[in-house]
Amino acid sequence: MKLQAKFRKIRNYFLIAILSAVIVIIIGALTPTKWFFDTSKSCDVDIRVVNAGLHSDIIIPVKTKNFDWNKYISLEGIGTDINQKYRYLSFGWGERNFYLNTPTVADVKVNTVIKALLYPNNSAVMHVQGFNELPDKKYVDVKSVRVSYDDYLNLAKFIKNTFQTDKNGRVNRVANGYRSWGGFYDALGSYSILKNCNNWTAEALKLANVNTPLLSTLSAPIMWHLRSHC
């Protein structure tokens, strides 16, 4: 009887711990990092965020009046397709092995997930894709928000500074992307359970004065908090 009572006590503690963790996750996902916005700011640049299920990507114009990606990355070298006059680029940061080998949810492997989340000093890559036209909302979970030129510049610099470059400042392409219009590049940072691809997306958006969830581990809460104040 004493053994059964002890087992029930341990089980109850375990269930309470799980329930508490779920409550914290829900509260963190629903709580915004910003409650008030400066509505006097101009709305100059359209930023789009794509929810790919496991990954989230940020889509931005190749060129604005205060930032030109042609100066930092060769558009012709991003993908393997023949039509490479891209007008938009998408960026997503993630753990190298997981990102390179997990294009869809169906490709997820338990050992890959465990290693990405728990193994220390996981190297990172940047997934870059080029688009002639913006993805159709009929086929992709995508939302847009407009920001000022200054806020966009903060975001663009953050993305640029995430690339790992050589001594001459050149980016290094390491693999083909999931599709012919994409590629993977060496990136800075170390992936862990505390910093994944969606945390990186949220950090970039926050620098652009875009609202994000307090807990941005998952892509769905990021999409839910996106609001255009124009």
Image: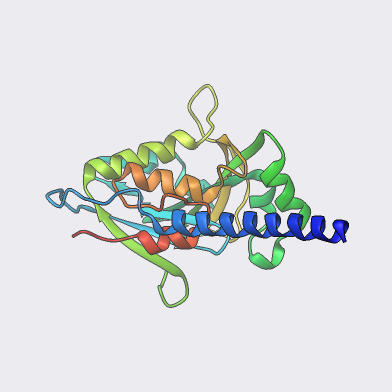
Q: Position of residue 14 (x, y in %)?
A: 70, 56
Hey, which quadrant is residue 17 in on the image?
A: bottom right
Of all residues, the one furthest to the front in this rendering is: 1
Hey, which quadrant is residue 54 in on the image?
A: bottom right
Please say if 208 is above or below 224. Answer: above
Please say if 97 is above or below 55. Answer: above
Please say if 65 is above or below 139. Answer: above
Q: Position of residue 9 (x, y in %)?
A: 74, 56
Residue 38 horizontal side relative to residue 78, left or right: left
Q: Position of residue 67 (x, y in %)?
A: 30, 41
Residue at figure coordinates x 33%, y 62% from the top left: 144
The answer to whether one can see residue 171 in this image is yes
Residue at figure coordinates x 67%, y 58% from the top left: 102
- Figure coloring: rainbow
Of all residues, the one furthest to the top in this rendering is: 167
Of all residues, the one furthest to the left in this rendering is: 40
Q: Nearer the viewer, residue 218 or 147?
A: 218
In which quadrant is the C terminus drawn?
A: bottom left
Residue at figure coordinates x 35%, y 48% from the top left: 33
Q: Nearer the viewer, residue 178 or 40?
A: 40
